[in-house]
Image: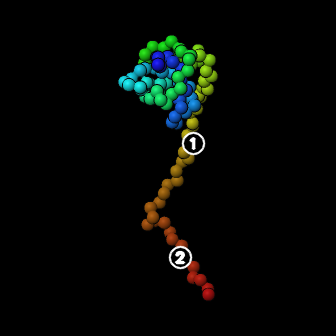
Amino acid sequence: MAKIGQLCVKLAGRDAGKECIIVEKLEGSFVMIDGLTRRKKCNLKHLEVLPKEAKIQKGATHEEALSALRSLGIKIKEKKKVKKEKPKKEEKKEKKPKFLKKKEPKKASNW
């Protein structure tokens, strides 16, 4: 049976193969997981429960779940937030209305 703080590996879905911790028990066979996965409601059938257990409170935050994973020896890749600089807009040239633009006459073709 799964407990709060139990280390798991996700077996199915987009986060398959990633480690997570059970944060909260829900109705039936569902639990709330968090860690290297997205915080999500998950069926126990989609988790492999491991024997390691961390001490966390029910409904722990994402940061608490990550620190619990670190305490269990799981390596966590830190994400660096990179702020992209927007290119500076050059001064726009004044646009003339279409009716003021001079049209060049079409050249006749010599066949």
Q: Secondary structure at mark 2?
A: loop
Residue 19 location, x and y as percent? 56, 25
Q: Amino acid at mark 1?
A: Pro
Give me the disc on residue 54.
Answer: none
**3D distance between C-alphas at marks 2 and 1:** 39 Å
Name the residue at the left extreme: 27
Count of numbered badges drawn on the protein: 2
Residue 14 location, x and y as percent? 52, 36
Question: In this view of the protein, can residue 63 be seen by the observer?
Answer: no
- Screen quadrant of the C terminus: bottom right
Name the residue at the bottom extreme: 111
Nearer to the camera, 78 or 34:
34
Residue drawn at the location 49% of the way across and 24% of the way down: 34
Residue 102 location, x and y as percent? 50, 69
Reply above or below: 22 against 98: above
Question: In this view of the protein, can residue 74 be seen by the observer?
Answer: yes
Residue 100 location, x and y as percent? 45, 65
Q: Amino acid at mark 2?
A: Pro
* Residue indicated by mark 1: 87
Q: Residues within 10 Å of mark 1 (few under 14, many from 20)?
A: few
Give me the disc on residue 105.
Answer: 2
Left or right, residue 87 beside residue 62: right
Left or right, residue 55 beside residue 26: right
Nearer to the camera, 70 or 7:
7
Q: Residues within 10 Å of mark 2 (few under 14, many from 20)?
A: few
Residue drawn at the location 47% of the way across and 60% of the way down: 96
* N-terminal label among 2 and 1: 1
Q: Secondary structure at mark 1?
A: loop
Name the residue at the top extreme: 55
Between label 2 and label 1, give the one nearer the viewer. 1
